[in-house]
Image (cartoon, rainbow, N blue to C red):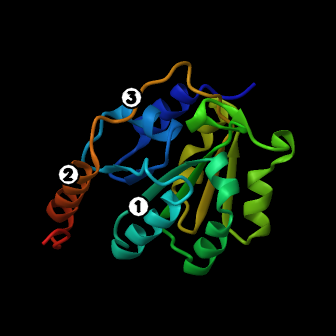
Amino acid sequence: MAIPIEEAFSTIAARRRDELVITSAGTSSEVWWKTTGDTEQTFYLEASMSLSTLFAAGLAMSYPEARVWAFLGDGAFVMNTGMLFVERALALPNLVSIVIANRCYGSVGGVALPDAAEIDVAAVARAAGIAHVAEFRTMAALSQDFDAAFGAKEPTLIVLDAALPQKSYGSPPLDGPELKYRFGRALERRFGRTVLA
C-alpha cells in the first residue's frame, strides 16, 4: 500500500532545516503548500511540468552552500528522463530530486501513466548513473532512513511510493511575479547577493 502523501510531506517538512524547495505542477505544489504555507524558501514551479529539477539544478549551482530539494511527480519524470543525464553530468552534491511515484498524472486528476505498473523510477535513475538513489514504500522506512537519504553528499534521487492526496488542496495563492519577488528577495537576504535588480 502506498504512503499517504500528506504524512510523507509532513515528515519531510518537519525534518527540513533550511533547504530551498522547488515543487512541480499539481500534487507536490498543492500538498507542500498545504503542509508548510512557505512563501519564501519554496518556489512553486506550477507552470512547468517536468522542469523542476533543472530549475533546482541552477539554484544548486548558484548557491553551493545551500541544499536544494526538487519535487516532481512520476508523470513529470517520464516526460523528461533526460534530466537524469543533466544531473549526472553536473554532479551537484547539494541537489536532491524527490519523485512522487503514484503511477499517474496527479495534476490532471489521476490519469494513469501508460504501463504504470512496469515503471521503476529508481532503476531508471541507477541505470542513468545517479550516484545515490533511495526508495521509500513505508512511513517507517522514510522516518528511519531519512537522514541517510536526504543528507547524502552526492547527487541524489529519492522515490516516494506515495498515494494521491486525499483531496484537492488547491494551488498556492501566489501569482508568478509575487512568487518570483518573494523568493528572490529571500535569497538576497539569506545569501547577501543581488538576485533582482
Three-letter code for the amino acid on which mark 2 is drawn: Arg
Residue count near mark 3 (Cα–Cα under 10 Å), binned few <14, some 14–19, many ≥20: some
Assign a secondary structure to mark 2: helix
Q: In this figure, which residue is indicated by the disc labeled 2?
A: 182
The percent coordinates of residue 138 (x first, y second) are 68, 31
* Earlier residue among tags 2 and 3: 3
Three-letter code for the amino acid on which mark 1 is drawn: Arg
Label 2, label 3: how many angstroms apart (C-alpha)?
18 Å
Residue 143 in view (yes/no): no
Q: In this figure, which residue is indicated by the disc labeled 1?
A: 67
| 23 with respect to 134 (left or right) | left
* Earlier residue among tags 1 and 3: 3
The quadrant the C terminus occupies is bottom left
Label 2, label 1: how many angstroms apart (C-alpha)?
19 Å
| 22 with respect to 160 (left or right) | left
Residue count near mark 2 (Cα–Cα under 10 Å), binned few <14, some 14–19, many ≥20: some
Mark 2 vs 3: CB contact within 8 A: no
Picture layout, residue 177 above or below residue 13: below
The percent coordinates of residue 45 (x first, y second) are 41, 51
Q: In this figure, which residue is indicated by the disc labeled 3?
A: 34
Residue 22 in view (yes/no): yes
Picture layout, residue 168 above or below residue 55: above
| 83 with respect to 92 (left or right) | right
* Earlier residue among tags 2 and 1: 1
The label nearer to you, 1 versus 3, is 3
Three-letter code for the amino acid on which mark 3 is drawn: Lys
**Which residue occupies 74% across, 70% down?**
128
Closer-to-camera residue (39/8): 39
**Which residue occupies 43% across, 47% down?**
46
Picture layout, residue 124 above or below residue 104: below
Assign a secondary structure to mark 3: helix
